[in-house]
Structure formats: C-alpha cells, structure tokens
C-alpha cells in the first residue's frame, strides 16, 4: 500500500483528500504546517507528498527544497492556489515533480498520482556493489545472498552510501541526507550508525566496504575484484 503525506493547513480539505485517497487504497498521513510536514516526512518516508504552498510556520517552497535535498527520490506534487506562472516555475525549479492549481478535481489529483508512480517505476531502485545488493523499492538489502536485518536508519544509511558509491561523504552530508535537516544531531551519531552497519556487514565478510576517509567521513568502497 502506497503512503501519501498530505501537507495542508485547511482541515476540511485535508480530511476530504485523505478520505478520497483512502478509497483508492492509499495510506495517508496529514501535516497541517510546514515544520510538522518535515518531521512526518522523515518519520514516515512516504511514497509521495502532496504539498500545499501557503502554509503556517514554514512555507511550501522551503519545505519542498528541504524534502528534495533529503530524499530526492520521493515524488512531490505541489498544490497552489495562486495561478501565476512564476510560482509554478519556482516550484518545478525547486524539484517538484508535478503541480496542481487549487481548486482541483480529486479525479485529476488521482490521475497525477498514478502518473507519478508510473514514472517512478522506471527510476533506479536497485544498487549493487560487489556482493552487496540493495533494493529500495522492496526495502531489502542482501550481503552475499543473506538478507541483512537493518533498522530503518541503517537501511537509509546504506542506501545513501550505495547511491554514492566510491565518493567520500562527509558526516554533515550524511546527517542531512539520512537523518534530515531538522534532526540537529551530533556528527558522532553517524559514527555510531556506521559502526552498527559494519557489524552487520561483517557477518558476510563485507565490513571493509565502508572505509573511513580521514578528515572527511566515509566512503563505500567500489570493490573492483567483484564488480
Ligand atoms: Ca494553505
């Protein structure tokens, strides 16, 4: 079941949209302001986001940029009551996958969602580095054929490493991407989680794949021998 985060400050609209999406077998999560939207986005990692533009606390464009920075693969449809071409351009430039102008017909929203999920089906969801395999659509990772039992955060971390294999990643970037901008955590959180991940990879003899890069952070080694 696909999960949709609805970001909308008008309760009448969000409850109507949530109900209609429910009829189509979507699971929904509702946030009524920009800050809450970012929290729920990180906590629930939805399959798509419907994002209103005019929001309390944090405007839709800022929310959009932060979401896209943290998880560019999650599609976002932004909804705007404004009908100015400039706003649509700003939204699309900030990474929105589609937009709808309010008021919109629920049928059109459903059609846009289907379109977005069809497009996503063609984007990359599997990654391989040597004996390490990750399928983000199935939310599964295997090391040398064995399924790794990873927490959501560990999975997110491994996903980020695999998307950026061979690149040195700073602790700050890892925090931003895996924990999100609003986490405000310490960089040693990254060290702790890299430790957990190495331990789990060690069972398949692959702990060496995550190397420390002095003065920077970490890198997922591209193992030439097996790739
Ligand atoms: Ca609004």
Image (cartoon, helix red, strand yellow):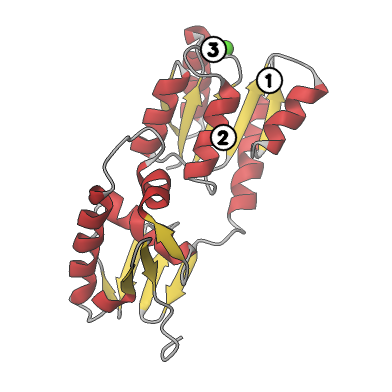
Residue 3 at least partly seen: yes
Dot label at residue 191: none
Work out whether mark 1 precedes mark 3 in sequence or the reverse, and give the earlier one.
3
Instruction: Give the percent coordinates (x, y) of residue 114.
Output: 62, 41
**Picture layout, residue 93 above or below residue 88:** below
Instruction: Quote the CA–CA distance across marks 3 and 2.
Output: 23 Å
**Residue behind mark 1:** 105
Q: In the picture, which quadrant includes the N terminus?
A: top left
Whether ligand 1 has any atom under 8 Å from the Cβ at mark 3 is answered as no
Mark 1 closeness class: few <14, some 14–19, many ≥20 residues within 10 Å: few
Depth order, front residue of 186/114:
186
Q: Secondary structure at mark 2?
A: helix
- Residue at 45% x, 15% y is 32
Work out whether mark 1 precedes mark 2 in sequence or the reverse, and give the earlier one.
2
Dot label at residue 13: 3
Instruction: Give the percent coordinates (x, y) of residue 88.
Output: 74, 27
Mark 2 closeness class: few <14, some 14–19, many ≥20 residues within 10 Å: some
Quadrant of ligand 1: it is top right
Residues tagged 3 and 2 counted as in contact (Cβ below 8 A): no
Residue 29: name its quadrant: top left
- Residue at 58% x, 55% y is 121
Dot label at residue 65: 2
Instruction: Give the percent coordinates (x, y) of residue 132.
Output: 36, 75
């Amino acid at each position: 079941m696909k999960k949709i985060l609805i970001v909308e400050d008008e309760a009448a609209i969000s409850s109507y949209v949530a109900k209609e999406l429910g009829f189509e077998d979507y699971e929904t999560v509702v946030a009524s302001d920009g800050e809450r939207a970012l929290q729920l986005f990180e906590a629930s990692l939805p399959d798509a986001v419907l994002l209103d533009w005019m929001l309390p606390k944090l405007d839709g464009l800022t929310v959009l940029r932060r979401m896209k920075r943290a998880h560019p693969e999650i599609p976002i449809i932004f909804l705007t009551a404004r009908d100015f071409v400039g706003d649509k351009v700003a939204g699309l430039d900030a990474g929105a996958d589609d937009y709808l102008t309010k008021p919109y017909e629920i049928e059109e929203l459903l059609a846009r969602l289907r379109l977005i999920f069809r497009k996503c089906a063609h984007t990359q969801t599997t990654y391989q580095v040597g004996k390490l395999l990750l399928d983000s659509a199935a939310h599964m990772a295997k090391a040398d054929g064995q399924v790794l039992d990873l927490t959501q955060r560990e999975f997110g971390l491994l996903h980020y490493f695999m998307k950026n294999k061979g690149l040195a990643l700073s602790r700050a970037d890892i925090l931003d991407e895996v924990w999100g901008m609003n986490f405000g955590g310490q960089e040693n959180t990254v060290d702790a989680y890299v430790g957990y991940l190495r331990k789990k990879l060690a069972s398949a003899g692959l702990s060496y794949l995550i190397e420390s890069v002095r003065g920077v952070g970490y890198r997922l080694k591209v193992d030439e021998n097996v790739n």
